[in-house]
Image (cartoon, rainbow, N blue to C red):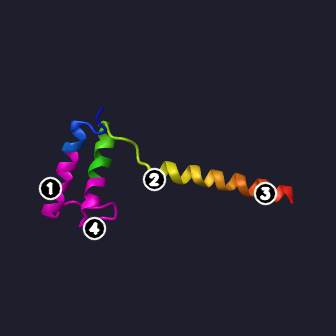
Amino acid sequence: MAKYGRSASKSVESAMRRKKKGTLKSGSGRSVKSRKQAIAIGLNEARSKGAKVPSRKGSRKSSSRKGARKTARKGSSKKR
């Protein structure tokens, strides 16, 4: 089964074209120079349109790690 849908690849393709032209802007308003950033913007646009794109990994990992750390700290301080 495919991870990304056709509409997702179209939006990434569009973002890459805009990057090459120099019209693709980041959130802060600066022009995008990095290829990876252009792909990320394209995928984000596809997500907002409702295309088949997997959710972002970074936000899920960081929240689960923080929760695990907090519980470990609380448990060790009570034992002493």
Mark 2 Cα shell of 10 Å, populated few (<14), some (14-19), many (≥20): few
Q: Earlier in the sequence, mark 3 or mark 1?
A: 1
**Farthest residue toward the top?**
1
Amino acid under label 4? Answer: Arg
- Give the Cα separation between the discs numbered 1 and 2: 26 Å
Residues shaded magenta: 11-40
Helix, strand or loop status at disc 3: helix
Q: Is residue 2 left or right of residue 74?
A: left
Residue 17 forms part of the magenta stretch: yes
Residue 39 spot, x, y in % from top left: 26, 54
- Give the Cα separation between the discs numbered 3 and 4: 46 Å
Residue under the point 71% across and 52% down: 71
* Residue bearing mark 4: 30
Q: Earlier in the sequence, mark 1 or mark 2?
A: 1
Mark 3 Cα shell of 10 Å, populated few (<14), some (14-19), many (≥20): few
Q: Is residue 9 above or below residue 41?
A: above
- Give the Cα separation between the discs numbered 4 and 1: 16 Å
* Residue bearing mark 2: 58
Residue 55 spot, x, y in % from top left: 40, 43
Q: Is residue 66 left or right of residue 3?
A: right
* Residue bearing mark 3: 76
Q: Give the camera-side residue of 43 and 3.
A: 3
Amino acid under label 1? Answer: Arg
